[in-house]
Image (cartoon, grey):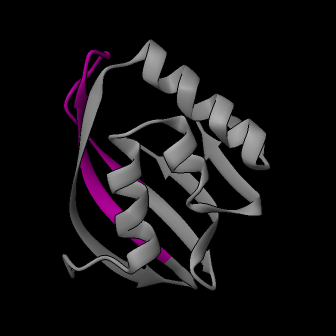
Amino acid sequence: MNTELPEPIAAYFAADKIGAEAVASCFTNQGVVKDEGHTYSGLDAIRQWKSQASTKYHYTIEPLGAQQVEGSTVVTSRLTGNFPGSPVTVRFFFRLERSKIASLEIIP
């Protein structure tokens, strides 16, 4: 597994430490996030998702490695925070469109 991340994905993990606006800026206008059984479509919904997640949980993400799987970049990460079962290993499935994220699915 490779530890180098494509630039849009590296930007996402850096933005995650900053806030909702920074995270949303990593996505295309029609970007989609699937997390915890919910789907968030568009930049406003992604901003709201990130804002709510940051309010509900305090966490850190440590990317451990990345690989290409069927057109997606899958980043395996350690997620540590104030939630049951912490720390956990989580997979982030990114689909890129040019220099932005078109979709992200987070799977524990």
Front residue (pair 54, 72) = 54
Q: Position of residue 6 (x, y in %)?
A: 38, 80
Write the residue at 46% across / 15% down. 55
Of the pair 69 and 8, the residue shown nearer to us:
8
What residue lies at 28% left-to-right and 28% top-to-bottom? 59
Q: Which residues are magenta?
A: 73-91
Is residue 82 on the magenta stretch?
A: yes
Left or right: 83 in relation to 78: right
Q: What residue is shown at x 53% (from left), y 67% (from top)?
A: 94
Left or right: where does residue 36 sit relative to residue 9?
A: right
**Residue 48 relative to residue 94: left or right:** right
**As drawn, is 46 to the left or to the right of 6?**
right
Q: Position of residue 90 (x, y in %)?
A: 35, 48
In the rendered image, which quarter is residue 48 located in? top right
In the depicted structure, whether residue 74 falls above or below residue 69: above
Number of residue marks? 0
Residue 66 belongs to the span the image colors magenta: no
Q: Is residue 68 above or below residue 79?
A: below
Residue 46: image location, x then y, percent: 67, 41
The image quadrant of residue 61 is top left
Name above or below for residue 52 compared with residue 26: above
- Foreground of the two, 45 or 72: 45
* Secondary structure mostly taken by the magenta-highlighted segment of the chain: strand
Residue 36 in view in this figure: no
Let me know if residue 108 appears in the view.
yes
Quadrant that contains the C terminus: top left
Identify the image quadrant of the N terminus: bottom left
Residue 93: percent from left, percent from top: 50, 63
Residue at point 70% right, 34% down?
38
